[in-house]
Image (cartoon, rainbow, N blue to C red):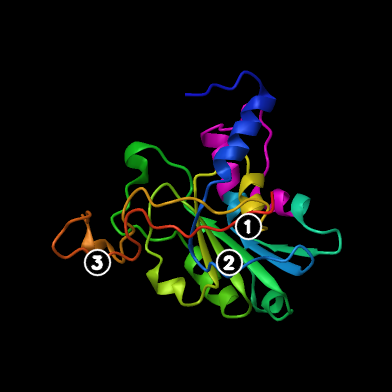
Amino acid sequence: MTWATSAEDGRSHGKEAAATPLLVSGASFSVSLAATVHYFTLETRIRDQQRTNLRWDVDGTGTTILSGIEATIDPSTQVVYSENPDSSVLADKYDYAIVVVGEPPYAETFGDNLNLTIPAPGPSVIQSVCKATKCVVVLISGRPLVVEPYLGDMDAFVAAWLPGSEGQGVADVLFGDYGFTGKLSRTWFKSVDQLPMNVGDKHYDPLFPFGFGLTTKGLK
């Protein structure tokens, strides 16, 4: 186990950990550094709850995925941010949309969820945005959630798990500085009716099997 000895060390290790999300679908999808990017996210709400409830930051600082994107893109790139876009926002034309949705932080039984669905309004944001423009969906969660109904609308799907306080690490792989290398440490189900599901089960029919994960090469 590696222990951080300073705030700077902690942020460095946090960025390394956040930079290992799982690319589940969309290997051919890449986000140009010089494009008009519309960033739709519930991350602000999730992030605020992380700061208040979990204090993952060593010194109260860190980076969100949004700030990581803004620090990574070409200066000519326009980033339009919207937490819950309406039809007027979607009427504009964008090269790409990065949709970040997921669960708020929880511990132990406070995270119990028999349906394992993406919290609202995440599903509606995915459907409305991804039908309007090319999109990559980044899911923040501590476990697989029900995503099969929305995969057909996505150009790429990234499981970022719980990236902690260094969202820059997620931006690094989204924009290709570093490659996707993550592999599933558990089976990703299609629906909760299939649970429990394990490798070797007679009727093993997952959405993504144990060990799955697309690999890409980074520029660095």
Residue type highlighted by circle 1:
Leu
The front one of 177 and 86 is 177
Give whichever of discs 3 and 2 has the lower sequence position.
2
Q: Position of residue 134 (x, y in %)?
A: 62, 75
Q: Residue furthest top?
A: 5
Residue type highlighted by circle 3:
Asp
Contact between labelled residues 2 and 3, with CB atoms less than 8 Å apart = no
As drawn, 176 above or below 61: below
Q: Is mark 1 on a helix, strand or loop?
A: helix
Mark 2 Cα shell of 10 Å, populated few (<14), some (14-19), many (≥20): many
Give whichever of discs 1 and 2 has the lower sequence position.
2
Residue type highlighted by circle 2:
Val
Residue 165 visible, this orientation: no
Q: What element carries label 2?
A: strand
Mark 2 lies on residue: 136
Q: Position of residue 218 (x, y in %)?
A: 64, 54
Determine the CA span between mark 1 and mark 3.
29 Å
Mark 1 lies on residue: 174
Check if residue 57 falls in the magenta segment. Answer: yes
Mark 1 Cα shell of 10 Å, populated few (<14), some (14-19), many (≥20): many
Q: What element carries label 3?
A: loop
